Image: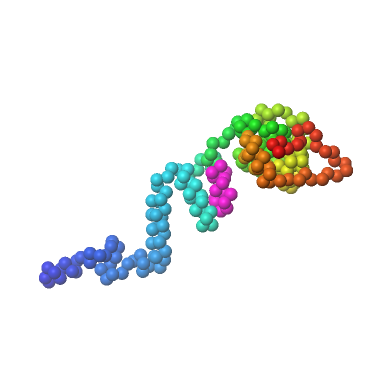
Amino acid sequence: MSDKDTRGADTAPEHMTAGEEADGSDPVRDSAGGTAARADLLAMHAALTALEPLDRKGRTRVLVWLADALEVEAAPRAVGRAEQAVPAARTSSAVTAVIAAEEEVPSPREFVSRKRPASNVERVACLAYYLGRYRSTPHFRTPDIVDLNTESAGPKFGNPSRDVDNADRGSGFLVTAGKGTKQLSTRGEALVEALPDREAVKAALREHPYRPRKRGPGNKKPQGNGGESGE
């Protein structure tokens, strides 16, 4: 056999890649499910290339967002204490939860001091906001507000039930959540996020108007610090 024939028998054409047979077949493409496996590998490589420059928190945010967008179950392999309460992402609220878990969490005292509420109903709204955002307690009862107010070193409520009711019926900062609980309303959330900027508060309350609900003959009109401030 000539040298030319020997070279033709022992070597594959130069355009063939590793894993291809001399007859031109590709085992990855020819096997059952091979094309899908190849696509998976290409996607993994592209994802790894895109995520590699990010830090751990950035990778977590991207993976959670992708899992939500693609409606698949996925969770980070290693999670910190603040992230352990975040379930596998399937809804957009999970993305918000991850971001909230990673941000610096102020103490109740720091948060309320920063917001500088000017009335009891504003203070109730701030405490309700804190419970929902930082304590995973969007639905709460009056004792929860009282306990958090004590933790924040706030002035003692003279009549907590009245103040919470004023924040609900009188100001529209809270709404009934069922089973004796309440939750922060959209109006209340806008108020807290606008604080302490009084001009921003006025704009937020105009954007989310509220007409106090009528009370029955036996219910007295709220007194004290029950009115809205900033309007």
Q: Residue furthest left?
A: 2
Splitting the image into 4 quarters, where does residue 13 fall?
bottom left
Q: Is residue 118 above or below residue 213?
A: above
Q: Image quadrant for the N terminus? A: bottom left
Residue that appears at 31% across and 69% down: 25
**Residue interval drawn in magenta:** 85-100
Residue that appears at 48% across and 46% down: 60
Q: Position of residue 164 (x, y in %)?
A: 74, 38
Q: Residue furthest right?
A: 217
Q: Is residue 52 left or right of residue 83?
A: left
* Residue 88 shown in magenta: yes
Q: Position of residue 46 (x, y in %)?
A: 39, 54
Splitting the image into 4 quarters, where does residue 226 fall?
top right
Splitting the image into 4 quarters, where does residue 111 fall?
top right
Residue that appears at 25% across and 65% down: 15
The reply to whether residue 60 is visible in this rendering is: yes
Foreground residue, 220 or 130?
220
The reply to whether residue 72 is visible in this rendering is: no
Residue that appears at 48% across and 49% down: 62
* Residue 65 shown in magenta: no
Q: Position of residue 109 (x, y in %)?
A: 63, 30
Q: Is residue 103 left or right of residue 26?
A: right
Q: Image quadrant for the C terminus? A: top right
Q: Position of residue 98 (x, y in %)?
A: 54, 45
